[in-house]
Amino acid sequence: MKTLKTILSIFCLAVFAVSCSSDNDNGPEPIKYAEENPLDAYMAGSGFSQKAVDVKNSGIYEYGFSFKPTVTGKINALVVKIPDVNPTLRITIWDAATKTVIKSEVINVATANVTVEKAITPIALTKDKEYFFTVNSDDWINRTKTDGSAATYPIVAGNITITGYAYISSTAVETIFPTNARNTYYAGDMSFKFQRTE
């Protein structure tokens, strides 16, 4: 009987050891990185968090910021706050080098000055490649430094480096790449949720 108990104990230990080792055969779980929104760090780094003025119905512009991710990742959501209602606010992500549209999305801004977030089919971004992120609108929050001085680019905002801001006169139906660079203000607020993938 004692021999049988010993054999059963050894057998159970062997089964347990095999089951534990098979659990680890796939290696460690992949890291899931947190999402990050670069807007607050951009505003702090530029000084444009110091003063904000609502601008409404002031001519339609395509405006936004250029940026480079410092790691490979993806945009999972778009985030916007403007000082007016707009059920068809268009946001566009561009390849900055070729000035071609990667993707445009429409967001329903149902309430003025309330942040709206829209989850999207993820847009893959390549490390160190430059992109442009724009909105098409006649409303924006004009952000400046209190003394009106210029910001110095690039501005590091987590895993996103903001390389500049620009605008261009547009229409509600046109999507035109912004070419008028400015460093004394930022028109917004629009941004995105970025997630590192490797």
Image (cartoon, rainbow, N blue to C red):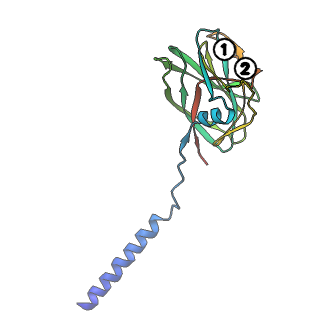
Point 55% across, 17% down: residue: 89
Give residue 127's quadrant in the image. Answer: top right
Give residue 22's quadrant in the image. Answer: bottom left
Position of residue 57 in the picture relative to residue 20 (left or right): right
Position of residue 117 in the picture relative to residue 153 (left or right): left
Spot the residue most to the left.
1
Point 54% across, 23% down: residue: 81
Task: Find numbered disc 2 in the image and state the secondary structure of the residue it sits on.
Answer: loop
Pointer 2 or 1: first along the chain: 1
Location of the N terminus by quadrant is: bottom left
- Residue 11 horizontal/vertical position (percent): 34, 80
Point 35% across, 82% down: residue: 10
- Residue 34 horizontal/vertical position (percent): 53, 45
Spot the residue most to the front.
147
Q: Is residue 177 visible?
A: no
Q: Is 10 drawn above or below residue 32 in the view shown?
A: below
Spot the residue most to the bottom.
2
Decide: marks 2, 1 in contact (CB < 8 A)? yes
Residue count near mark 2 (Cα–Cα under 10 Å), binned few <14, some 14–19, many ≥20: many
Q: Nearer the viewer, residue 26 or 94?
A: 94
- Residue 42 horizontal/vertical position (percent): 65, 34
Q: Nearer the viewer, residue 117 or 183?
A: 183
Check residue 178 in the rendering and tell me which mark sits there, or answer none: 2
- The residue carrying mark 1 is 61
